[in-house]
Image (cartoon, grey):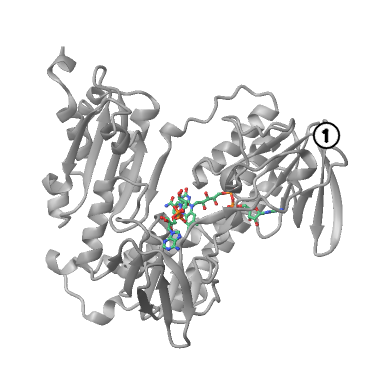
Amino acid sequence: MTRIVIMGGGPAGYEAALVAAQHGAEVTVVESDGVGGACVLYDCVPSKTFIASAGGRSAFRNAGELGIHTDDNAAEVDLPVVHGRVKGLALAQSADIRARLQREGVRIVNGTAKFCDDTRGLAQHRVVVDSNGETETLSADVVLIATGATPRVLPGAEPDGKRVLDWRQIYDLPELPEHLAVIGSGVTGVEFASAYTELGVKVTMVSSRDRVLPHEDADAAAVLEDVFAERGTTVVKHARADKVENVGDGVKIHLEDGRVIEASHALMAVGSVPNTTDIGLDKIGIELGRGGYIPVDRVSRTNVSGVYAAGDCTGLMLLASVAAMQGRIAMWHALGEGVSPIKLKTVAANVFTNPEIANVGISQHAIDSGKVPARTIMLPLATNPRAKMEGLRRGFVKLFCRPATGVVIGGVVVAPNASELILPIALSVQNQLTVEDLATTFSVYPSLSGSITESGRQLMRHDDLD
Ligand SMILES: Cc1cc2nc3c(=O)[nH]c(=O)nc-3n(C[C@H](O)[C@H](O)[C@H](O)COP(=O)(O)OP(=O)(O)OC[C@H]3O[C@@H](n4cnc5c(N)ncnc54)[C@H](O)[C@@H]3O)c2cc1C
Ligand SMILES: NC(=O)c1ccc[n+]([C@@H]2O[C@H](COP(=O)([O-])OP(=O)(O)OC[C@H]3O[C@@H](n4cnc5c(N)ncnc54)[C@H](O)[C@@H]3O)[C@@H](O)[C@H]2O)c1
């Protein structure tokens, strides 16, 4: 029986464990914190639960336009309930995953794992587990490294859990901040800026670039900036934080160019660093790549035989869905199952702001820069009948297809529930469907997804109709 040791119990680790157990391997997951990993306990799951509460409050904002009035108190935020729900849901999901793994016969060891091979080049590997000072050594035919990542700490802006916070500490705040400065305008930064704005907090975003979401669709980022401006959220651009000081009753953010921003609290959202430095990689001969990530191929193999890596520690695309797929692929490959290499061009992703921003496939940037030839369309939601009925004025659907064949190669949706609306486009990209396939599909009337089928129709050329 193949003995598999998995270092880390996040989506990469636990999804891999499920696959390996189903294929009859003897599986041990070593997890230093809680099953479900940072994803379930601190990052993805808590933030989306928090954002759900913020969304509950936003529902009241446009109610007046629809003819529904509430008094101001109706949308008051009960923060202990919000935070309690966030933490409770995370723990419950962690317990569910633990129970599922145990049902499948996976052994879970609480502790910190590290390679301890005597020499390099061995067919089998050894992993030592430290559980509060007690150690156990595990032998493995296959090891999966799935140790994830940790919030990046800016020297001079170390989180103190009181006024200078990372995104894992905010759920311990007794009250909503009076004025929150969010440092970093990547996905994490804008999601929290949007959520706190929706909860009625004054927010200032400190963005080192000339726009928020520098890696996302530029038109989508512009919509978000408009929304921020409308709701009184300030974005300070070309602003790189050098130091963040807790001054007792607030914070001072010193920018590299000498400007100073004052707020009551600062949320550091300046990225994350992979957990790869203290796991004995030197013992087996893995050298870290740029940013400290573990280099892997498209079936999650490292350069060392029998050792795979998956998830945030590989830096491929820092998403739970990608981590889980990398973990599964690693196990299918290790256990000799037929497996297709991971295809990142088909990954659908979503930014959980209000409105949401979802994308899949080729980006507008790749098309505009001439890298990928494509026909493109952008339909504002303002032209969609359902959007009008619901009072939605912002947002759009973009669709991209190959010029000659009309095969759908990507798209972007900006809408309140873009994470749900992106699926037909993702399905088209994954299965190489054409704009004609979309155009001839019945969508419900009236519906926001009608804008997706309409985009397909508008991208059809006359020769597509022959
Ligand atoms: C604020 C935020 C929101 C996010 N929202 C989303 C989202 O909405 N959708 C999405 O797809 N992705 C989201 N992500 C990204 C997602 O959380 C990560 O991509 C995902 O957690 C990666 O999973 P993983 O298994 O690689 O690592 P992790 O979830 O980080 O799990 C790794 C685990 O390994 C453990 N570990 C580390 N070292 C050792 C060791 N030596 N021994 C034993 N155990 C160890 C850690 O304690 C941790 O529990 C978000 C990220 C952040 C920061
Ligand atoms: N909804 C989701 O799926 C979701 C949510 C959150 C994070 N994530 C994943 O996590 C990854 C990381 O996102 P992230 O936003 O945490 O990190 P990031 O690295 O993408 O963004 C951090 C931002 O902080 C800025 N920054 C760094 N130092 C700064 C300074 N001193 N002053 C001001 N700004 C500074 C950087 O320029 C960057 O734009 C994303 O690529 C995404 O895949 C996904």
**Residue reaching furthest to the front:** 257
Q: Position of residue 454 (x, y in %)?
A: 17, 34
Q: Is residue 314 above or below residue 442?
A: below
- Which quadrant of the figure contains the N terminus? top right
Q: In this rendered view, identify the residue nearer to me: 380 or 266.
A: 266
Answer with the quarter of the image where residue 62 lies: bottom left
Amino acid under label 1? Gln
Position of residue 37 in the picture relative to residue 250 (left or right): right
Residue, far top: 466
Relative side of 199 to 340, left or right: left
Q: Quadrant of the C terminus?
A: top left
Total number of numbered labels? Answer: 1
- The secondary element bearing badge 1 is classed as loop
Q: Reply above or below: 292 against 245.
A: above
Q: Nearer the viewer, residue 117 or 385?
A: 117
Q: Is residue 466 visible?
A: yes
In the figure, 246 relative to 403: above or below? below
Q: Residues within 10 Å of mark 1 (few under 14, many from 20)?
A: some
Q: Nearer the viewer, residue 259 or 37?
A: 259
- For image coordinates 37% across by 52% down, the residue present is 351
Residue 93 in sight? no
Residue sitting nearer the eye, 118 or 310:
118
- Which residue is the site of mark 1? 124
Indicate the position of residue 261 as horizontal and vertical percent values. Answer: 36, 76
Q: Is residue 166 left or right of residue 78?
A: right
